Amino acid sequence: MAVSNQRFLKPHLVAQLATMELRAATVVEGVMSGLHRSPFRGLSVEFAEYRRYQPGDDLRKIDWKAYARSDRYYIKECEDETNLDAHIILDASASMGFGSHGMTKWQYGAILASSLAYVLQRQNDAVGLTVLDEKIRIEMPARNTRGHLMRAIGELERTEPARRTRLAPLLHEVAARIKRRGMVLVVSDLIDDCDDVIAALRHLQFGGNDVLVFQTMDPLELRLECAGPHRFIDPETNGMVAALAEDVKSSYLDSIGRFLDRYGEEMGRTNICYTLLDTAEPLDKAILAFLGHNARRK
Amino acid sequence: MSFINPYFLLAAAAVAGPVLLHLLLRNRPKRQVLPTLRFLPNSAQQSMSMHRFKNVLLLVLRSLAIVLLVAAFARPYIAVAPEEEKKEQAKTGVVFAVDASLSMRANGRWDSAMGRVATYAKTLPDGTPMALILFDQSPRIACSVTTSFADIDAALSKSAAGYGATDVLAAVRAAIDLAGQLDAESRKIVAISDFQATGLKELAPNLAIPPSVELITSPIDEENLWNATVVSAGEADEEAADRRRVRVQMAAYGEGGRTGTLRIRHGGSSLAEREVTLRGASGLVEEFELPLEPEREAILSIALDLDDALREDNEYAALLESRGPLPLLICGDSAGASPAGPERAANPYLAAAIAAFGRKVNASWTRPEGLGGVSTVEHPVAIIEAIESCAPAGWDAMKQYATAGGSLVVFPSAPAAGVARGQENAADTYRQLCGVTVEGWEELSRRTGEYRLVSSRDTHGVLPAIDQAGGALLGYPKVFRYLKAVLQEPSESTRALMGFDDGSPFLVEHRLGAGTVYLFTVPLESKSSDLVLRAAFTPFLYQLVDHCLHEGRTETYFTAGAHLPVEGGASAGELTGPDGARITLGGSPAVLAMPGVYGIRQGASERHIAVHTDGEESDLTVMPAARIASLARASTAALASRGLDARTLGEAPPDPDAAGSYWWYLLLAAMGLLVVESAIASRTSR
């Protein structure tokens, strides 16, 4: 197990992640102590405020020292450092199996997801995993045990991208299933109808979740760096277009640019953390850039 | 279109170069997975189609440029008809090639040929271009291209079968050339002939019938044909100093008879005119006494006018030679031979004969040794009365005389004289001079009545008059003593013209250089034979001299003077000569002395043969039309194997100047294509 996990948890990557904290941008519910702030006042060690006793309050929460000084009953409230439920949603459609320079988008996204899950598990957050293509293939609930993390990583190891994409409907379905607010990390190329995907992400956001989107794109998809006659094939639909690359490149870059800009604009407007990842860029650099960005946001 | 340098067209194979390069180096579309396929523009497919189109266009331009360059160097040309001939083309043009050789005189073949032309012409639509070629051994255009059959008919009416040989192939070639001048979509050659096989047996390898020309053969057969003609005309005999007798031989063929007029003219004036009646398959001989001096040469025009046979210009020209005395040189050195004159020669029989010749023979005398310096032109015939009595120097002179072209008539010396003078060298003399080996004298006993008869068998017709007269003329001379001569090697140069009834040679002919030596094996005296005592001796000697003067060379098969080989024994059939004379064919071959057409009846069958100075013309065997066609096809194939195009036969030859102007256009077009190709290739690469 340890050997196979090396594929996604590279030692040098893990070492770098161990020095940084991933903090959730929003307050989430949790029962476990952690780095995340909880909206519930409870048993954590960090003092929040005093409030007057109300009938029905737990008598055990009365601060007797404050009663001795002011002869009034006060309830001492603390900001609890609670655990976070992080749901990692990974797209495993056939389009994710494409890679023009040795690493496919699926491999890139899976390493990214594993790394994030590892970091979350280190800070005692519960991590859940959902793998989907045209339907939900793998669904693991959020837990904060190391064994759970290893099983999730094992599932990623065994999964091969195939079939067509039904990203938006399935995101709606996942949003409906998440009961506790937490963090949702979506790793996908988002090659689907932009409006539908944005609507689905907002559905996730409406549940109180902090939504982070990692759009993985291959450099060929981003820049179409090829020349000569080509027979381009869509891996999901098997549609084929024969074209002279240099003749269509300009038009293609315009279209793909509008597509990506649209995602960027819509997610910025809805406070969804959106990161476009080029699979040609080093994976660790991409993750650290995200964590840095997340820390600044906090 | 044709090409001056057709071999350059082989370079068109270079087109394969750009085609191969195109196939090998073309950019096949690379298969590329692209999940973002939806973002490719809708015009993507069009760009690919345009890319393919440009590639194909470049290939076509390059190939076309090569083809144009090759065509330019092949120097194409188009045979263009002259402007004035650019009328609306008729569908079919016809060239009539009509045989006018001697064989077409047989059995009305010429009339049949004219009828064939008229019959065929009636089937042609108005305006059909046509032409007429008459041919025998050489073709001639009797009527150039016309659209009126009246012109053809007029030309035919003015013509007739002559006396020439036949060369059908030359005629077909000429017809092909003439057909090329016909302004028509297709061309036909209608060859009308009796198609004698011998005239076609040596097919020229260059003969080829172009695909655009159809050869139609119309063989003339002997069925229901009739014709008549003057076969020969010549002097019959000498009658008087101021008159000459001319003998005209006519022949008719076919069924029925005809009546016409025979006219003889000389120097623009009519000498004689006589109505003659000719019957089918028969001959007719008419003799005329004409007021012409025998010593002067005269050319007679003899015309036989028949309504439905020969035409008005079918005239026979006869040459009457001047009949001066025959030159004769008598050689002998016997004591009795007197320089005073040959009539006083030692041999009394020879002297008597010369005296009897009178003005017919101009005899002179010399010694044998003097023959070496004698002109064979002035003295073409010499008689050696006793060869063995001559000195060796005389023998050398005889050989020199004969080799130079003289005719030497040699009589052996009587045995008694031979012993006296140099007989030891006689054997060599006979061998070298006469081509025979002598085995001594054959002595027969006159006392007991032993003798040999001179036979006319196997004389080969060299002396036809003597031979035909045979024993009757000679009176079957009896020979009691003769020189036994054996031909060294029977051949064309040495042969026995006449022999005895036991087969021994009586008269031997031996070719020596340019001349001929005739050896009699019987001495010219009465003890050896009674030849010299007979009345026929003098005319026999005269005809021998006359024969020597005219050098009666033996012709080949079926030429005048040849023998007709007849199978079937003594009752093989009957031969009808051109003069109408009938000869029963027996064991001995019949002599075809006169030129003309002979009829041979053997049993129920009857056939005709033609006798001509040209042996091939005398063969009336018809070659089947299918055979002619196959020969033409084979010839066409042979022509093609040599890289020649039969279709170009008959076309106008290319004008080098006009042809040269075309190739510049092609070269400029090729250069233009290359410029366009470069521009498109440049844009494509960008």
Image (cartoon, rainbow, N blue to C red):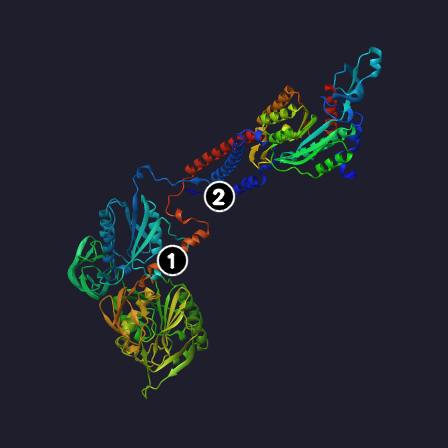
Q: Give the answer, above or below, for where B331 lies relative to B206.
A: below
Which residue is located at x 72 percent, y 27 percent?
Answer: A286
Neighbours of disc 1 within 10 Å: few (<14), some (14-19), many (20+): few
Quadrant in the picture for the N terminus of chain B: top left
Question: In front here: B310 or A272?
Answer: A272
The label on residue A71 is: none
The kind of residue on which mark 2 rests is Leu
- In what element is the residue under mark 2? helix
Question: For the view shown, which residue lies furthest in the bottom direction?
Answer: B448
User: Disc 1 vs disc 2: Cβ atoms closer than 8 Å?
Assistant: no
Q: Is residue B299 visible?
A: no
Q: Which residue is mark 2?
A: B9
Total numbered labels placed on residues in the image: 2
Q: Give the answer, above or below, for where B686 lies relative to A39.
A: below
Question: In front here: A160 or B381?
Answer: A160
Neighbours of disc 2 within 10 Å: few (<14), some (14-19), many (20+): some
